[in-house]
Image (tube, rainbow, N blue to C red):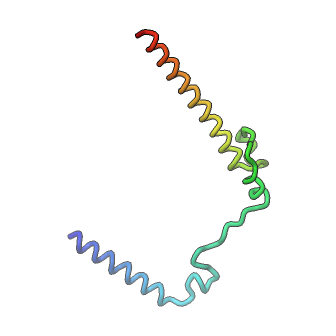
Amino acid sequence: MIQRAALITLLLCFAGSVWSEEEEGGIEAQGGSIRGPRISESKAEADCKQEKNWPICSDEDWGPKCPSGCRIQGLTDKTDKEFGKRIETIKQKKKKKKKKK
């Protein structure tokens, strides 16, 4: 049963590819290309990539600033602080256990 389903699927794929090749005026004739449009970045985005120290941004700063680096730096700093607090808590608990022994 599974072999029949696989065979039918294979035949349908083959028929679809042959059928699409026979049609004239395909996507290439209409101006399309195989890879699609290329993404070009603006000058502001290119400048943002060079910056290393981003200020922490709020959601209101999304438009006027470079959002990717700014938001990522803010999220990284926030997560770093959270992990630092967790590590300190673990260290304190470890010290308390050593004192009890």
- The residue at the point 57 percent across, 78 percent down is 34
Quarter holding residue 32: bottom right
From the viewer's perspective, is residue 7 above or below residue 100?
below
Q: Position of residue 99 (x, y in %)?
A: 46, 10
- The residue at the point 20 percent across, 70 percent down is 1
- The residue at the point 50 percent across, 23 percent down is 90
Q: Which of the image's four quarters has the C terminus?
A: top left
From the viewer's perspective, is residue 73 above or below residue 14?
above
Q: Position of residue 84 (x, y in %)?
A: 58, 29
Instruction: Decide which of 30, 59 is in the foreground and name it.
Output: 59
Q: How many marks?
A: 0
Q: Position of residue 36 (x, y in %)?
A: 61, 73
Instruction: Decide which of 46, 19 is in the foreground and name it.
Output: 46
- The residue at the point 72 percent across, 54 percent down is 49
From the viewer's perspective, is residue 9 above or below residue 25?
above
> On the rendered structure, is 46 left or right of 87?
right
